[in-house]
Image (spheres, rainbow, N blue to C red):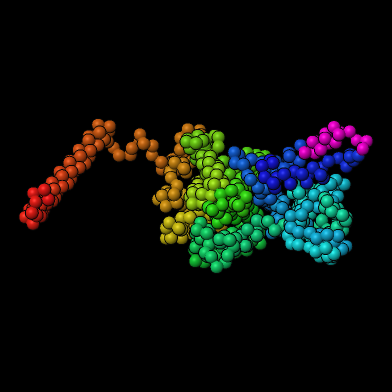
């Protein structure tokens, strides 16, 4: 932990705050007692500091990105509220979607008296919580001059222990008291403040903001004059709007029409049940907002990669974005359930259904092959960023983008197939949202077929009997374009029959199961010998031709030399010359 100055400073500040207040060094105090007190505080601080950078699977973050992981908590609370099936639950869920909840909420404190000293972003202050304990807050933004009063001081609670009031089961006891004073270690004077836990705790890191701000977030360095990132451009090409996911989700929340006329989409949410609308909202938030943002974070990491400065201190922004991508891929709930409710969890849910668990994608238990591959690439990309290998890091990003298509395609196929067995509006909604999440990727490969697909996944009507077979065939035709394979996707597995479901088999053909009849080892050996013989004959003829050409050139050179030598000899008076 003490490898960098930043970590040392964090631990030392924590020790100053955490050391027991009743121990005051003085002439009567024994040195061992003081050392024990400081050592205990240091151990506690090391543990809390390490927890902020806890490993995600076998990936080790270099920065604190817990606030991005906590978006999974917002999604979980939304889901629980929507499951109540009443209007109040939908209202509260939309409030979390819009205003956030667990992901890095900040408190807006009103500076009540003249500041005794200047404050800048990053400064840490110590105050008292509602529960009476010590609370550390960090100035998040802006600078404040000495003597300033009546302005807003925006702070973050350490450990993300203070959450926005109004959330289900919200505990504000670890928030600052609503009226009090803050101190800075090493400074004289107190910062007097007031605020409301109900109205003044907010969050900029909301699921909705990730979609609404996509117009700038998905461009290099947020520059609106730059084009969209390559992978996100596929979504914009298809949906025609960068905030496509928010438009869909808010239509489901508000129970109104969702229209995308250029694609022939007219979804009437007024006729959908609350269960179906919940399905649309939760899956669209997870896989049409948070999942694309994983790739956006990887793109940002590549943008900030500096080849001329491979030292870690130079590429901090790259590491932070890289860690953010991993956090958004897994989410906080991954630590509790082993799956979670984001992309990692989707891949884990799909692998037993498609027999794509394990490193060989040939099992129905264990870690999904997609997750194994993605985390391998995550670690490679982190190492490339550390060493300033920016081109290699970009290739890593491309690989992750391709891998993340696999569980989405699997979920689309499974929902299409399950609807044939159970045609409910909830099943139709699941079919619609997963297939719609895949369509921009297929559209990039074949712009004609997606219109057919879009019209056949309307959540308000029953799919045709052959919709699954047709869409599966179209997906498989474009696997190469999407840089994935039949082995990655697998087929829908029937554990009772210990085989694939008829009509939903994998398109992967193992090497020893060639579909060409009449071909055996002897035929292959004979063909190989013929090919080798022909190539050898061609090489022999070409070598003879080159040799003949070389000899003719030698002969010509010899004639030219003899002729020149005779002329020189005739002009000389001495034999020796």
**Residue 136 x, y percent position in the rendering:** 80, 49
**Residue 457 x, y percent position in the rendering:** 51, 55
Tell me, yes or no, whether the highlighted magenta stretch contains residue 37: yes
Residue 278 visible? The answer is: yes
Q: Specify whether 83 is left or right of 538.
A: right
Magenta region: 27-42
Image height check: is 94 above or below 329?
A: below
**Residue 13 x, y percent position in the rendering:** 78, 46
Pick the residue in front: 74 or 503.
Answer: 74
Pick the residue in front: 190 or 368.
Answer: 190
Residue drawn at 51 percent across, 56 percent down: 231
Pick the residue in front: 514 or 72.
Answer: 72
Q: Quadrant of residue 289?
A: bottom right
Residue drawn at 67 percent across, 45 percent down: 4
The chief SS type of the magenta part is helix
| Quarter occupied by the N terminus | top right
Residue at the far right in the pictured view: 28
Residue 427 visible? The answer is: no
Pick the residue in front: 156 or 499.
Answer: 156
């Amino acid at each position: 932990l003490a490898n960098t100055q930043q970590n040392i400073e964090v631990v030392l500040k924590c020790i100053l705050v955490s050391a027991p207040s009743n121990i005051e060094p003085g002439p009567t105090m024994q040195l061992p007692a003081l050392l024990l007190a400081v050592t205990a505080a240091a151990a506690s601080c090391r543990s809390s500091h390490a927890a902020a950078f806890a490993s995600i699977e076998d990936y080790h973050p270099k920065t604190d990105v817990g606030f991005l992981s906590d978006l999974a908590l917002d999604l979980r609370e939304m889901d629980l509220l929507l499951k109540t099936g009443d209007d109040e639950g939908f209202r509260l869920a939309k409030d979390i979607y819009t205003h956030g909840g667990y992901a890095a909420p900040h408190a807006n404190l009103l500076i009540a008296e003249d500041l005794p000293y200047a404050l800048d972003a990053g400064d840490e202050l110590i105050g008292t919580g509602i529960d009476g304990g010590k609370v550390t807050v960090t100035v998040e933004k802006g600078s404040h001059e000495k003597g300033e009063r009546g302005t807003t001081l925006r702070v973050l609670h350490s450990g993300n222990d203070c959450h926005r009031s109004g959330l289900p089961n919200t505990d504000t006891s670890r928030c600052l008291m609503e009226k009090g004073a803050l101190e800075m270690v090493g400074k004289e004077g107190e910062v007097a403040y007031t605020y409301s836990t109900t109205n003044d705790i907010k969050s900029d890191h909301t699921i909705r903001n990730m979609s609404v701000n996509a117009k700038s977030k998905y461009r290099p360095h947020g520059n609106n004059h730059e084009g969209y990132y390559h992978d996100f451009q596929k979504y914009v090409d298809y949906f025609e709007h960068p905030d496509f996911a928010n438009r869909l989700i808010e239509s489901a929340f508000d129970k109104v029409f969702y229209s995308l006329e250029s694609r022939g989409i007219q979804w009437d949410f007024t006729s959908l049940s609350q269960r179906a609308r919940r399905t649309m909202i939760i899956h669209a938030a997870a896989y049409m907002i948070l999942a694309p943002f994983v790739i956006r974070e990887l793109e940002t990491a590549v943008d900030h990669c500096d080849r001329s400065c491979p030292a870690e201190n130079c590429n901090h922004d790259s590491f932070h974005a890289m860690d953010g991508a991993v956090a958004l891929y897994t989410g906080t709930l991954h630590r509790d359930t082993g799956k979670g409710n984001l992309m990692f969890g989707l891949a884990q849910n799909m692998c037993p259904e498609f027999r794509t668990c394990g490193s060989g994608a040939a099992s129905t238990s264990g870690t999904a092959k997609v997750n194994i591959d993605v985390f391998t690439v995550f670690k490679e990309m982190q190492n490339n960023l550390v060493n300033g290998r920016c081109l290699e890091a970009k290739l890593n990003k491309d690989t992750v983008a391709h891998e993340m298509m696999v569980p989405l395609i699997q979920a689309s196929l499974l929902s299409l197939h399950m609807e044939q067995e159970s045609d409910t509006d909830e099943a139709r909604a699941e079919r619609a949202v997963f297939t719609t999440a895949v369509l921009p990727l297929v559209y990039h490969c074949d712009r004609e077929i997606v219109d057919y697909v879009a019209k056949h996944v309307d959540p308000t009507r029953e799919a045709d009997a052959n919709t699954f077979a047709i869409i599966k065939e179209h997906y498989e035709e474009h696997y190469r374009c999407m840089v994935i394979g039949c082995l990655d996707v697998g087929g829908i597995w029937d554990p009772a029959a210990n085989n694939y479901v008829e009509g939903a088999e994998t398109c992967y053909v193992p090497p020893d199961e060639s579909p060409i009849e009449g071909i055996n080892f002897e035929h292959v050996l004979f063909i190989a010998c013929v090919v080798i013989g022909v190539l050898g004959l061609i090489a022999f003829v070409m070598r003879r031709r080159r040799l003949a050409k070389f000899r003719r050139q030698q002969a010509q050179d010899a004639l030219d030399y003899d002729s020149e030598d005779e002329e020189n000899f005739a002009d000389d008076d001495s034999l020796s010359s």
